[in-house]
Image: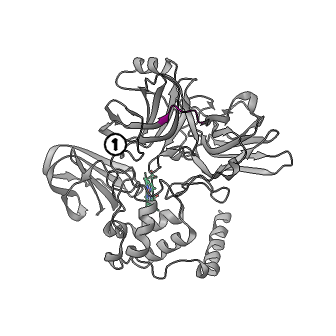
Amino acid sequence: MNHKISFKKISTLFFAIFAPFLAKAQNPNWAQHIAPILYQNCTPCHINGGIAPFSLVGYTNAQGMASSIAGSVESKRMPPWPANTKYKRYAHERILSASEIESIKQWANNNAPSGNLNLAPADPTPIVGSQIANATIKLKMPNYTVNTSSDLYRCFVLPTNIPQNEYVTALEVIPGNRQIVHHVLVFQDTSIIPVNLDNADSGPGYVAFGGTGSQTSQLIGVYVPGQEPFQFPNGFGAKLLKNTRIILQIHYPGGINSQLDSTKVYLKTTSNTLRQIFIEPILNHQNSNMTNGPLYIPANEIKTFNTKYSVNSKATIFSVAPHMHLIGRSIKAYGLTPTNDTIKFIDIPKWDFHWQRTYSFVKPVIVQPNDKLWGEARYDNTTANPYNPNNPPLAVSKGEGTADEMMLIYFWYAAYKPGDENIVVDTSTLKNISSTVLLKKLDAKLSPNPIQNYLDFNSNEPITEINIFTLEGQKVANYQLDRLKKGRIDISNKPVGMYIIELKSPEKSSRTKMLIE
Ligand code: HEC
């Protein structure tokens, strides 16, 4: 494709001309230059027991992955941050600067030198448990054993039993098992529908993909791995209704065998009246709001839909969170003033259902009566869309199922008061948070390296499971073992290449990168 080649040429030219002026380290080494970048941006997920398939803590791990690291940051696949930062910047962003990317590239091209290891930052310290102080409501879902070959979306209903309305000032989701909890949507609902759905499904919780299955559920929070607890700006809170139930909708990716999860949600609440933050899908797929609805995408077609909302009272907007399913490929939200000035909210050029999150503005965005808000979403219902749940494609319409679609853009907003434009959503607090490590590091000897046909393992712990992942994080093999401390597995059918070998005992785990020859 022509435009790709010319883009590459232009970017090479860019670096040839401008790279000398970028504030990058000369001859970057791991200890002084690379470790600080990885510990800030990668190890919240790439840590033993984290959601990513391998750890980037320590020199050996980073050195072994140097060229993949460089490739992933150059292509901007990592760290995952789907919003276009050329369009709009956010608080608590996790993205790398051009000079950080350049340093990583140079380091990798230069054989990934360690530098003086005494100068390296301390390994990220695992945080166990809660990060918000003085939570007033602590809820835990029942133990649930996850067994799933394909993506599983399951809702768990947790009664709050609060005797009066309260305001939530901070919300934290604490995954029970960080290796399998890919995202969590937190809803509240006072209706009986989620309870009925739960009763109709055996085991704890019930299956629901796009939401909770109840029209009256209100979103109050979103968790993705590595995301800091959500703190509402000072003086603001989300209203929690008397006797409401919290519903956690959890996404467990496919390929999970007999893993236990018991995720918690902690809320900091007050019975004082605060300025209320409303969390609503202001831009949505209701036919009456769409200019070219209904949301219906025939098989083998690519369609773009537009939806609008006319602002009727002055409002202070803190955050946005777009939501589509698997046919959705891009989504954008903006406002237009009566004089046609653009108010930018968000642009996600490559929608990825698996990395949806809340984006908070650094300063709130104020909208006024007569402003029009617009949402634009593109859907690709052809076989070219790798996430298409149907092959051959089938017609898709509005709904909550995996194979249905949605177009929702949630806004976190409050009624405007003078001075709101001066609020700064703090980017310094709650930023340097690394992940909880629930599983301790397991010591095991694996041999031979490179692996030829067989892998021998030897450990002090009883091994119950061995997994093999590609460097792209795809699980290609799973072996269930009967608490063996020593043993051999047959790998003769795996293609040659680098893999991540994961060993698990009931309490510990380890991941090692190895070559299969
Ligand atoms: C929010 C969690 C998260 C953060 C932060 C993160 N990763 Fe990842 N990373 C993952 C997951 C999960 C995978 C497995 C594949 C997938 O699901 O996309 C992965 C896969 C990878 C891969 C292999 C696949 C690929 O795309 O190349 C590399 C290399 C990688 N990450 C490097 C990094 C680096 C370097 C950083 C920091 C600059 C980083 N990651 C930050 C979660 C994360």
Q: Amino acid at mark 1?
A: Asn
Taking the magenta stretch, the answer to whether it contains residue 85 is no
> Which one is nearer the viewer's eye here, 91 or 416?
416
Instruction: Tell me the quadrant of the picture where the N terminus can be found.
Output: bottom right
- Magenta stretch, main secondary structure, is loop
User: Is residue 334 at all visible to an observer of this figure?
Assistant: no
> Where is ligand 1, by quadrant?
bottom left
Q: How many marks?
A: 1
- Residue named by callout 1: 177
Q: Which range is magenta?
A: 269-274
Q: Is 475 left or right of 287, judged from the image as shown? A: left
445 shown above or below 183: below
Instruction: Tell me the quadrant of the picture where the C terminus can be found.
Output: bottom left
Q: Is 32 left or right of 18, judged from the image as shown? A: left
User: Is residue 408 at all visible to an observer of this figure?
Assistant: yes
Residue 376 position, x and y percent, is 71, 43
> Which one is nearer the viewer's eye here, 498 or 233?
233
